Amino acid sequence: MEKIKTKIRSFIIDNFLFGDDNGLKEETSFLDEGIIDSTGVLELVTFLEDEFEIEVEDEELIPENLDSINNIAVYLEGKSETP
Amino acid sequence: MASKPFSQDVLTLDPEKEVDKICNKLRKLLSKQFKRRGYVLGLSGGIDSSVTAALAARSVGPERVLALLMPERHSSEDTLSLSSSVADHFGIPTVHEDITGILEAMGFYRRYNDAVREVIPQYGKDWKSKIVLPNLLKHSGFSLFSIVAQSPDGNTIRERLPLKAYLAIIAATNFKQRIRKMLEYYHADRMNFAVLGTPNRLEYDQGFFVKQGDGAADVKPIAHLYKTQVYQMAEYLGVPENIRCRPPTTDTYSLAQGQDEFYFSLPYDKMDLCLYGKNNDISVETVAGVLELTSEQVQRVFDDIDTKRSTTRYLHLQPLLIEAVPEISY
């Protein structure tokens, strides 16, 4: 789980914050903090699909799965458990 | 307006007063700000550009207005005849500039088809397509665009767009609005005219325009009016009925595309009332009651309005400076 969080954190900081972590916490909401807009969601989904070799289904495109480092990590863990 | 009780009629305006206000302002801007002699606009055959043309003609006289008719290969068949009929109706001179050749030279059709083929490899020259968003009322999560493609034998394929293909399709399609604007400024410079933009309030507020494309203009005379009000103005100004009865379309993709499947989550009349309700602190429950939607659905629309405002902020921004240049400020 920690390895996954590190990868996501690094992607968010590199891609959306240009290297400045701005106090990004694992529970920080990307939307509330204005880190990600709708194109950003698409970038994030593309990253997750490529990096973790998964397919994010339409019904999974919800803040509960994608709006923070913690949420994404839990979502990915659930995905890996799905047969 | 905010003091009126919230109802379907809350957007009813006094068209005569509104027309006078806009026409006076358009005259003043020409003489005091722009120092130009008339107005150019692109006429699409839609309600917004038709009303803007009528206002310009009434404001400075039709002979001081030039309407450009700029269809291309993917425009709907009636675009040219509808836009010509509006110009004729108001006595506005026109120039027909078919932009297919320019788009061809810019590689638009090739770039667009290549981008679609990243998702639908069999997409061929004779196929048609459009991009669509999921219906916000039925879907509670993030909305990502899909491409809908139709083969010549009528089979339809729908695929969600990955980042690269999505950006490539939008980037290519934006050529259309930017080429049209380039031609508007060419004719404006040639005639010493200024350029009119034609967005209504919904489009302006929600960033439904292309930066340096249809978003570029010297003045946007109806950007403060909800689309429902634009229709009221159209009736008062005598815009031909076939224009007033035509459902709003983007007329941008080769497959017919309603504005409410591409960008807005509801038909314009309901979208207008949601935007008005949100702007005037009307409760979600009250708006839901008038629109016969659930409170949850209206809340989603309110949230989507905020998301679009935030996502499209970049489109509204003027070029920014690192330091102010105090001698140049308007």
Image (tube, rainbow, N blue to C red):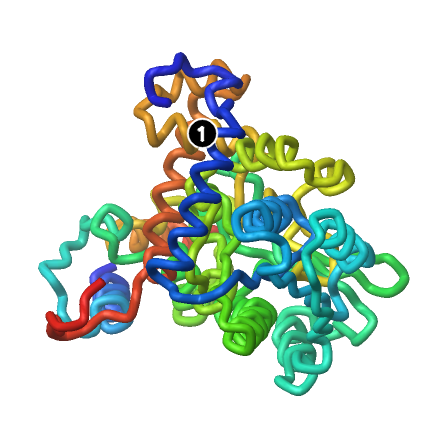
Query: How many numbered marks have been drawn onto this rendered protein structure?
Result: 1
Q: Residue furthest bottom?
A: B105
Please name whichever residue, A12 or A76, is drawn nearer the observer in this view of the structure. A12
Q: Give the answer, above or below, for where B309 lies relative to A19.
A: above
Residue B168 at least partly seen: no
Quadrant position of the N terminus of chain B in the picture = top left
- Type of amino acid under label 1: Cys
Which picture quadrant has residue B155? bottom right
> Residue at (64%, 84%) from the top-left corner?
B107
Q: Mark 1 = which residue?
A: B274
Image coordinates of residue B62 in percent, x first then y, are 63, 54
Image-based side of A67 in relation to B265, left or right: left
Which picture quadrant has residue B184? bottom right
> Residue at (28%, 49%) from the top-left corner?
A31
Q: Give the answer, above or below, for where B12 lies relative to B94.
A: above
Quadrant position of the C terminus of chain B in the picture = bottom left
Image coordinates of residue A21 in percent, x first then y, are 13, 66
Q: Chain of mark 1?
A: B
> Residue at (32%, 51%) from the top-left corner?
B310
Image coordinates of residue B274 in percent, x first then y, are 45, 29
> Residue at (68%, 56%) from the top-left corner?
B92
Image coordinates of residue B303 in percent, x first then y, are 37, 37
The local secondary structure at tag 1 comes to helix
Residue A6 at least partly seen: yes
**Badge 1: few (under 14), some or many (20 or more) residues near its Cα, within 10 Å?**
many
Which picture quadrant has residue A11? bottom left
Q: Give the answer, above or below, for where B43 lies relative to B324.
A: above
Please name whichever residue, B313 or B100, is drawn nearer the observer in this view of the structure. B100
Please name whichever residue, B174 or A75, is drawn nearer the observer in this view of the structure. B174
